[in-house]
Image (cartoon, rainbow, N blue to C red):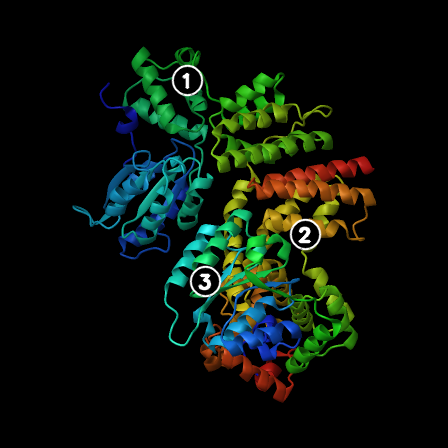
Amino acid sequence: MSIAELLWVEKYRPRTLDDIVNQKEVVERLKVFVRERSMPHLLFAGPPGTGKTTAAHALAHDLYGENYRQYMLELNASDERGINVIREKVKEFARSRAPEGVPFKVILLDESDNMTGDAQQALRRLMELYTASTRFILVANYPSKIIDPIQSRCAFFRFTPLSRDDVVGRLRYIAEREGVDYDDEALDTIYEISEGDMRRAINVLQAASAMGKVTIETVYKVVGMARPREVREMLKQALSGDFTGARNLMRKLMLEYGLSGEDIVRQVHREIFSQEVNIPEELRVMIADYLGEIHFRLIEGSDDDIQLSALLAWLALMGKRLK
Amino acid sequence: MDKKIPWIVKYRPRRVEEVVDQDDAKRLLREWLGQWARGRVPERRAALLYGPPGVGKTSLVEALAREFDFEVLELNASDYRRKTDIERTVGVAAGKRPLFKKGLLILMDEVDGIDPRVDEGGVEALLEVVKSTSNPLVFTANDPWREQIRPLRELCLMVEFKELSEGAIVSLLQRICEGERLQCDKEALKLIAERSMGDARAAVNDLQAVAEGYGRVTVDVVRALIRGRDKSLNIWRTLNSIVYAKQAWMAKKAVTQSEVDYETLITWLSDNIPKKYTEPEDLYRAYEALSRATLQIARSKTSGEWSLLPYVFDLIGPGITFARTSGSISKEKYGFPEKVRLAIQLKTTREIREKLAEQLARNTLTSKSTVKNEIIPYLTIIFRNTSNPIIAARIAIGYRLDKETIKFLAGPNTENVLKTIEKIRKAKPEEVKEEKPETKKQSKTTKEERTAKNNKAKSTGSLDEFLKRS
């Protein structure tokens, strides 16, 4: 056994199309591209953790061999929002000639549904400009957010949510190889919690195995711990009317976990529909409504600390009215 | 009395000891410039000195330069702000050798005055210089938290200068009175000091104006001189005027006449409102006003429509005053904003998280935001698990995580994880060295899977057991 350990999502990622055990239809069609060494632009759509990005890498691997990454430009629209960055990088990459024996180079644009409408229009131009030398693979959770002109230029691949057997089977395979002590039901629980998202399922397994035997209890414990306890605590304190206490927790979340205002808003959003937060049902909806407004203000670029303070002050007021 | 030389120049401190207060700043800067003087380039090649005006920023730099025998090249940022100017001046100076002395120090004032719209590319050009300069570079700023100089902040050694105490200014004024053989009432000096609000330069100038105009410095003269001036309000007074304003125009005037800019004022309001307002209704309305104010600022920044700004003043002035309808005003004192104190610490945490997200995003083929939301939380669980630090240690080795990153992930469990890594390193030095997670990923994975299959080892258990097995 080696000393060094990696994240299992990296260690057990399928490297070739043959390694991918599910998404059979998709994989069969992709293999045809490899055999014929020709393909159109592709659009991979489907829920998170269903193997879209993995399939794109496996496809490139099968096309170009071990060192495939030198023929592929990987961009992530949620990290590089500016179309100018994308344009520059695409231009530079497309300009270099494809080496002998390589029919085209691949540009992988991950989370492409995060691009703004303007950026997508610009992307459409890029796709036309560089068709001769490159192929785009767009990966998206929600294909409806991709503008029609781009969709119509791509072959569409739908990735379906993974089945219970797919997920549990893979978890068992990993657990066996890693010598993890586990209960069978615990793997079922992981599947249910992760909602067919393989990445989350594997992460939960790895974290749970670090706690000892993987049981239903450890799985729930891990999932609970993955969200900082302080979020719920902050929510409770605000609703009890303790604004200052709640704000101290908010700052602790930012400081210790490095969370941004948007991160915290998202986590609060998850909490407000939890039965462990004891509030009237209609208040949950009201909080969601105001949360959406605060989220919008954050996206517009206004100050994290102040927006969250406003949220907490509002919650404290709601809490007072409840009493 | 020599009227030709302004006292502010005549009595400028020559030695570091003569600079009033600012002990932290002295220590930090002396250490930093000392490194340069010994011929070693410090990790941060530029220093950003910040604090209110007239508290000794430039004086300290000049005194220290004298101490280490450095020439000082002074540039005012308001003269050279555009990209080409900066490249032509600062950029050239950054590569020069000193003419007469041991070293050359470049001092650039008022760097917070750079306007991102008018001076396009200015900050970027400065960043380039900071990264490559072979001479120490010192910036000064009154307000270091302005968004436009954020990238600069991240590259610079941040040195804070505090507002001077009234006592410190009075004794400075007394020294000058003695030097000028002036008769000065102590009460009058106190009045001047109070009026200066911690700004030594303003106090010395006022003293000279009074002394030269009237030949003596008494309470009456000082009072007479000050009366009729349009006083700018200091931050405490601004806060008070807003909280206690009787009519909307008063609150508005408090904002527009304040010497602090609106963004600083918002930070102070945000931390002080809960000290003054106690009714949840009032508190909510006040924060809603602040929230809308920052939204409005963001809008005017992105659109470049500065005509939207006056509404900000309405919201943070009268908007705060009249947020209070029912409750009374608490007697609690105003305080220095936590947020400013936390900002630097927060910056470090965010940087570490960002760097880790970037590394793992490459390795796990996903976006930084997915790493932050879907991977780092689970890593945190593994690293904070006190009962079994071996897995955390192995992952730290696998990704070659540095100490800061381990600390970010492990929190209170940091020592435990670090010790385990140390033990593994001692037991298996050759293996730990070999690991190159990014380049050898492919082959290592298969090897790893093979060995794991063979010995079916449990990943939990004692460290000794683990080391024996591996």
The furthest residue to the left: B100
3D distance between C-alphas at marks 3 and 1: 80 Å
Residue B420 seen in the current view: no
The image shows residue A60, relative to residue A237, as above or below, that is below
Residue B229 locus on image (x, y percent): 43, 14
Q: What residue type is labelled 3?
A: Thr
In which quadrant of the rendered image does the N terminus of chain B lie? top left
Find disc 1 in the rendering and name its residue.
B188
Name the side, left or right, on which B94 lies relative to B184: left
Q: Foreground mark, 2 or 3?
A: 3
Residue A297 locus on image (x, y percent): 61, 40
Chain letter belonging to callout 3: A
Name the side, left or right, on which B66 lies relative to B314: left
The image shows residue A310, relative to residue A277, as above or below, that is above
Q: What element carries label 2?
A: helix
Dot 3 surroundings within 10 Å: few (below 14), some, or many (20 or more)? some
Q: Earlier in the sequence, mark 2 or mark 3?
A: 3
Residue A39 locus on image (x, y percent): 52, 70
**Label 3 with label 1: CB-CB less than 8 Å:** no
Residue A60 seen in the current view: yes
3D distance between C-alphas at marks 2 and 3: 42 Å
Chain letter belonging to callout 2: A
Discs 2 and 3 lie in a common subunit: yes
Q: Pick whichever, B104 or B204, lies toward us.
A: B104
Q: Which amino acid does label 1 sit on?
A: Ala
Q: Residue A131 carries which label?
A: 3
Find disc 2 in the rendering and name its residue.
A267
Q: Pick whichever, A275 or A146, lies toward us.
A: A146
Q: Which amino acid does label 2 sit on?
A: Gln
Residue at image location 46% in from the left, 26% down from the top: B259
